[in-house]
Amino acid sequence: MSITKDSELTGMKKASEAVAYTLKEMRNFAQPGMTTKELDNFGGQILNGFGAKSAPYVTYNFPGFTCISVNNEFCHGIPSDKKILNEGDLINIDVSAELNGFWSDNGGSFVLGTDINHYQKLIDTSKQILHKAIHAIKGGVRINDIGFLIETEAKKRGYKVIKNLTGHGIGKSLHEEPSEIANYRDRYNFTRFKKKSVVAIETFISTTSTYTETLKDGWTMVGNKGGFMAQHEHTIVVTDGKPIILTEMNEIWN
């Protein structure tokens, strides 16, 4: 969407507060021995407290309030009573929701407890690249130039990017134009970021794989060559200068 009046910006800020606070609190609540379903239910209660509705459930009938992916699961993991979290797990939580007709999206990967499996470098790389990418975005910048920045920074640090997962426009629905904000230079995408547009910018930084494949459950995605992935995401408003980071209170950069 494009922000055309103050009430729209206010609506986006409220929806973004709901998803950002939920993500932060879920990250703090997660502990070894807990199931991903327990963690998801906790997040669902917070969204409900805001009066917000789970975007993946409303849009796709996803079997959960949030997506929770663990270790070799890259994204869209289904919350389960059978999946128990362990010390040192690589966890990704993606929270998106609708509130009063406005939609916002954010996500983040983190290590549960002590980094016994050495995932932190991957996570830090994803965070740092997202920060650099977002602060390079303003009206008129080519979307594929941001993709080039993300992939270049990943390669410098010895990582790859996932090419079939992208950021996207958002605001009046979960996925809007621009429909693909890729993590690499898409030679066929000549679109530029537009001032006052709302977009969800995501990094998909991988150790081994460059594409994802969907498991038999129809949702969970893993790498085509295995390995691990870190994802971090903010919903922002594009300006002529520094973007407005609507989901900043999720504290994924802390």
Image (tube, helix red, strand yellow):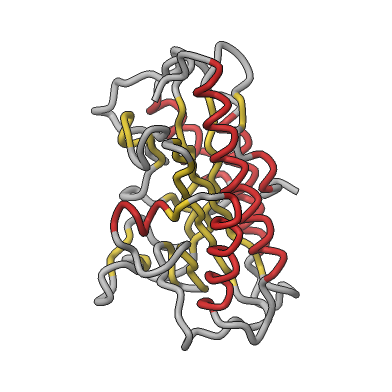
Residue closer to the observer: 135 or 20: 20
The correct choice, above or below, for 217 with respect to 245 in the image is: below
Residue closer to the observer: 35 or 99: 99
- Quarter holding the N terminus is top left
Counting from the top left corner in percent of width and height, residue 184 is at: 39, 38
Counting from the top left corner in percent of width and height, residue 89 is at: 61, 76
Q: Quadrant of residue 211?
A: bottom left
Total numbered labels: 0
Residue at 46% across / 63% down in the picture? 65
Left or right of 205 on screen, residue 254 = right
Residue at 61% across / 40% down in the picture? 247
The correct choice, above or below, for 142 with respect to 253 in the image is: above
Left or right of 150 on screen, residue 42 = right
Residue closer to the observer: 222 or 63: 63
Residue closer to the observer: 74 or 119: 74
Left or right of 15 on screen, residue 114 = right
Q: Quadrant of residue 6?
A: top right
Residue at 42% across / 20% down in the picture? 2
Residue at 34% across / 48% down in the picture? 163
Counting from the top left corner in percent of width and height, residue 224 is at: 31, 66
Left or right of 173 on screen, residue 201 = right
Counting from the top left corner in percent of width and height, residue 45 is at: 58, 64
